């Protein structure tokens, strides 16, 4: 490159520094290609995940608690709507542990947990503004269904007796001249919440425990199926083994189908019916239709004890 051309280039470069990329372009391509060729044989290793997957802290969600199934006895609305000292005492104890945090020990709605609640918890000592009202049926309804769009959740898990107790306590302690429910209101409450029918509340157990039980049950089933298969393979010359092998295309599937169902266990008739329907789906084959009575006997007796 002679001097003047060199200077010319230098001038160009000063005016437009981007030009340097144009000059270096061929070299960059060669470098990229080189790196690419180097890694090509290693591609399977490069794409493998080298960093162990990070398992983030599991979100801890409270599981269900164990609860026995409960039957809540029917209540006589007309009886339980009379405030007895026992009902009021029950209501008082529950009020202090469950409600006073918001509604306050004195029922004026200024409990420590009421801060920032909009609407504020009901001040029971004031007559204005009630949604469902100060009657027993009104308070019962507020407890059963909650008050929409407010901090007042539904306390439907309380028993009817507890809800009546709370209503009696609130009315006797905080409300002056509480209005009396008429017969229609009480009757309506009974109809609305099936109070005279009583309630059956199913039991519950933690999901984790339930899943463990299911897993154990499955494991137990697998054990039985594999034991039977081993038995059949070990004793392969026995009449039962030969029979089972001849009538099944997939022995494991056939045994699983049997293990997973109880309808065939009752009698040999139901056993025959079970095996001769859905023959192929259950891992059996058409030879099953040629079995004689004695062979059915043998099979049934073997399978009922094995599975
Ligand atoms: C988290 C705070 C909170 C707790 C705990 C709470 N409440 Fe409330 N309660 C409220 C709020 C908020 C309202 C709605 C006020 C409104 O609608 O203006 C309300 C309203 C009520 C009403 C009035 C319904 C009406 O007709 O206006 C009753 C009765 C009531 N609660 C009873 C109870 C009882 C009994 C308990 C305990 C089992 C309880 N509350 C627990 C916040 C609470």
Image (cartoon, rainbow, N blue to C red):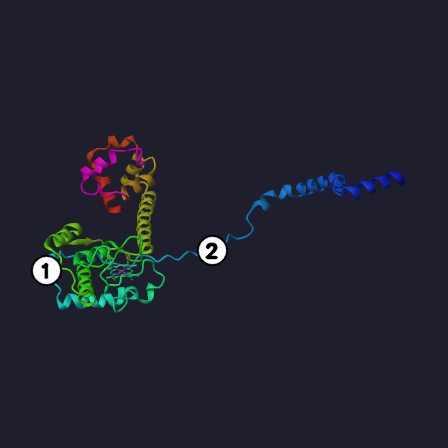
Q: Is residue 238 left or right of residue 26?
A: left
How far across and down, in percent of the image, does residue 59 sit? Answer: 41, 56
What predominant SS class does the magenta segment belong to? Answer: loop
Percent position (x, y) of residue 31? 71, 42
- Of residues 176 and 171, the one nearer the viewer is 176
Question: Viewer-proximal residue, 155 or 215?
Answer: 155
Q: Residue at the far front: name it.
A: 128
| Alpha-carbon span between mark 1 and mark 2 | 56 Å
Q: In screen coordinates, is 59 left or right of 220?
A: right
Q: What residue sits right under mark 1 in the picture?
A: 79
Disc 2 residue: CB within 8 Å of ligand 1:
no
Q: Would residue 156 be found to the left or right of residue 187 on screen?
A: right
Which structural element holds mark 1?
A: helix
Pointer 2 residue = 56
Quadrant of the rendered structure where residue 6 is?
top right
Q: Residue at x 17, y 50 (%)?
A: 192
280 is within the stretch colored magenta: yes
Residue for point 29% across, 61% down: 121
């Amino acid at each position: 490159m002679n001097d003047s051309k060199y200077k010319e280039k230098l001038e160009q470069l000063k005016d437009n520094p981007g030009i340097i990329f144009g000059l270096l372009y061929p070299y960059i391509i060669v470098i990229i290609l080189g790196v690419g060729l180097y890694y090509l044989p290693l591609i399977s290793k490069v794409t493998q995940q080298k960093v162990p997957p990070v398992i983030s802290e599991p979100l801890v969600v409270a599981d269900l608690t164990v609860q026995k199934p409960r039957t809540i006895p029917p209540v006589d609305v007309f009886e339980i709507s009379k405030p007895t000292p026992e009902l009021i005492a029950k209501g008082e104890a529950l009020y202090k542990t469950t409600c006073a945090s918001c509604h306050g020990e004195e029922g004026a709605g200024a409990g420590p947990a009421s801060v920032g609640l909009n609407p504020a918890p009901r001040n029971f000592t004031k007559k204005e503004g009630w949604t469902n009202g100060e009657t027993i049926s009104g308070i019962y309804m507020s407890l059963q269904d909650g008050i929409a769009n407010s901090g007042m959740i539904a306390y439907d898990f309380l028993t009817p007796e507890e809800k009546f107790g709370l209503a009696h306590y609130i009315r006797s302690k905080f409300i002056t001249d509480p209005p009396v429910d008429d017969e229609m209101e009480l009757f309506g409450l009974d109809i609305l919440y099936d109070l005279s029918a009583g309630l059956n509340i199913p039991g519950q157990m933690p999901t984790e425990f339930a899943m463990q039980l299911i897993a154990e049950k499955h494991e137990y089933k697998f054990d039985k199926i594999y034991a039977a298969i081993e038995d059949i393979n070990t004793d392969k010359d026995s009449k039962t083994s030969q029979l089972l092998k001849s009538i099944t295309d997939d022995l494991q599937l056939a045994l699983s189908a049997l293990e997973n169902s109880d309808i065939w266990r009752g009698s040999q008739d139901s056993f025959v019916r079970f095996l001769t329907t859905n023959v192929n789906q259950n891992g059996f084959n058409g030879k099953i239709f040629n079995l004689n009575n004695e062979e059915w006997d043998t099979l049934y007796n073997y399978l009922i004890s094995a599975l």
